[in-house]
Amino acid sequence: MKRLMIAVGLMLVTLNISASEFVLKDLQGNVQRLSAYKGKWVLVNFWATWCPPCLEEIPDLVEMHNARKTSDFVVIGIAMSSSLDSVNAFARQMEISYPIVMGDDRIAAQIGKIEALPTSYLYDPSGRLVSYQAGMVTREAIENYIRAKSKK
């Protein structure tokens, strides 16, 4: 297993890189698999309805997902809230257009450690985990990271 140091926003993190498939069922009953998004950047974002930084970052994630989903980027949201009704109402209110999965420890174990909310994991188009961010992310930070990696 390789270790990689990267900068996301202002945070420097160390990642263990290994391609690992996740299989998640979203609120519409569709299966979300990492391998289904081969060729696209995939951001898996853990959030909760009661989390102020989550509320702040979701509009950027919706905007970015809508702008790029047909080309090279997709967001999968994992709601770490306890009530399906509250998550559905929240998703409608925030106009979340990307797939949402109800999260728990079993779901989180497929992706990685969740020390804070929000937490995001970014996979490159080959399906490798390349970035981890505990705390809020912005569209600008994600796009800058993707742009920098795409130039290499």
Image (spheres, grey):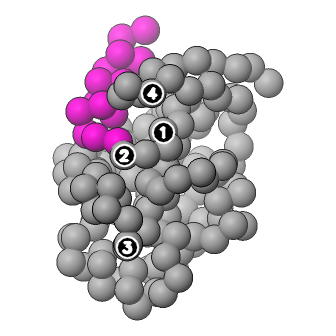
Circle 4 — which element?
Answer: strand
Q: Position of residue 98 (x, y in %)?
A: 34, 62
Residue carrying label 1: 133
In front: 80, or 76? 80
Distance of label 4 from label 2 (alpha carbons): 11 Å
Q: Extreme right residue here? A: 1
The residue closer to the viewer here, 76 or 69, is: 76
| Residue at image point 71% right, 57% down | 109
Q: Amino acid at mark 3?
A: Thr
Q: Quadrant of the N terminus?
A: top right
Of marks 1 and 4, which one's residue comes earlier in the chain?
4
Q: Is residue 145 magenta?
A: yes
As drawn, is 118 to the left or to the right of 14? left
For badge 2, the amino acid type reads Met
Mark number, residue 49: 3
* CB within 8 Å, label 1 to label 4: yes
Q: Estimate the x, y position of residue 95 in percent, counting from the top left.
A: 21, 70
The residue that disc 4 covers is: 11
